[in-house]
Image (cartoon, rainbow, N blue to C red):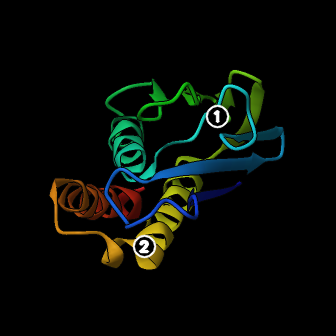
Amino acid sequence: MNMEFSVRPDQGDPSGFDLGDMLWCGELGQAGSAGHRPDQGMMIYVSVTELMDCLGGLLQGRTRSASFTGADTSFGLAFRMTTKGIRVASSSGPVAVVSPAALALTALSAAEELARLHLDGLPPDGVADDYVAALRKFRLTAHAC
C-alpha cells in the first residue's frame, strides 16, 4: 500500500490551514481527494493530525473499526479489522487489506514526509504544534505494531 499527503501550490503564505490532498493506493484500488467535483481538498495538516489520532485506537486494539473524514471535505476512509488484516475502503470501494504494521508504517512515513517538506515553513501556531504532538504519539504506536 502507498499513501501520499500533499499541499496544493499557490495558496499564498503558508498556514496551518493550507489545502491539500491525500492519495491512497492498494492492491484493490485507490482513493484520492484530488480531481473531484465538488472539490474534496482538505485542510491537510489538520486532516493528517486527525487521521493519526483515528488510526491510533485501531492499531492499539481499542477498536475494531474506525472512520476518517478529512477537515472541511467530504473525502473519507473506513478501516475495519478482519481476519486477513485491516481493510481500507473509500466511498468508491475497497483500497487494500494490509497488516496493522504495514498500515502504521506507511501512514507514519507519509506523515513524516509531509512534515519534512512543509512543516518548517508554517508559522508557529496551534496547528503545527498539534501535528508535531500527534506525529510523536503516532510514531510510538507505529513502532509498537
For the residues labelled 1 and 2, the Cα–Cα distance comes to 27 Å
Mark 2: amino acid: His
Q: Nearer the viewer, residue 9 or 97?
A: 9
Percent from the top left, x then y, of residue 114? 48, 67
| Residue at x-position 42% and y-position 54% | 18
| Looking at the image, residue 139 lies above or below residue 27 | below
Q: Quadrant of the N terminus?
A: bottom right
Residue placed furthest toward the front: 12
Which is in the foreground here, disc 1 or disc 2?
2
Residue underneath mark 1: 88
Quadrant of residue 37 within the rendered picture: top right
| Residue at x-position 37% and y-position 26% | 63
Q: Nearer the viewer, residue 40 or 61?
A: 40
- Which numbered disc, 1 or 2, marks the residue that appears first in the sequence? 1
Secondary element under disc 1, as helix, strand or loop, is strand
Q: Nearer the viewer, residue 78 or 69?
A: 69
Residue underneath mark 2: 118
Mark 1: amino acid: Val
| Residue at x-position 29% and y-position 62% | 140
Residue placed furthest toward the right: 28
CB within 8 Å, label 1 to label 2: no
Quadrant of residue 60 within the rendered picture: top left
Secondary element under disc 2, as helix, strand or loop, is helix
| Residue at x-position 67% and y-position 27% | 90
Left or right: 54 with respect to 91?
Answer: left
Percent from the top left, x then y, of residue 103? 56, 51
The residue carrying pointer 2 sits among few (fewer than 14), some (14 to 19) or many (20 or more) residues within 10 Å by Cα, namely some
Quadrant of residue 135 within the rendered picture: bottom left
| Looking at the image, residue 87 lies above or below residue 3 | above
Percent from the top left, x then y, of residue 30? 78, 41
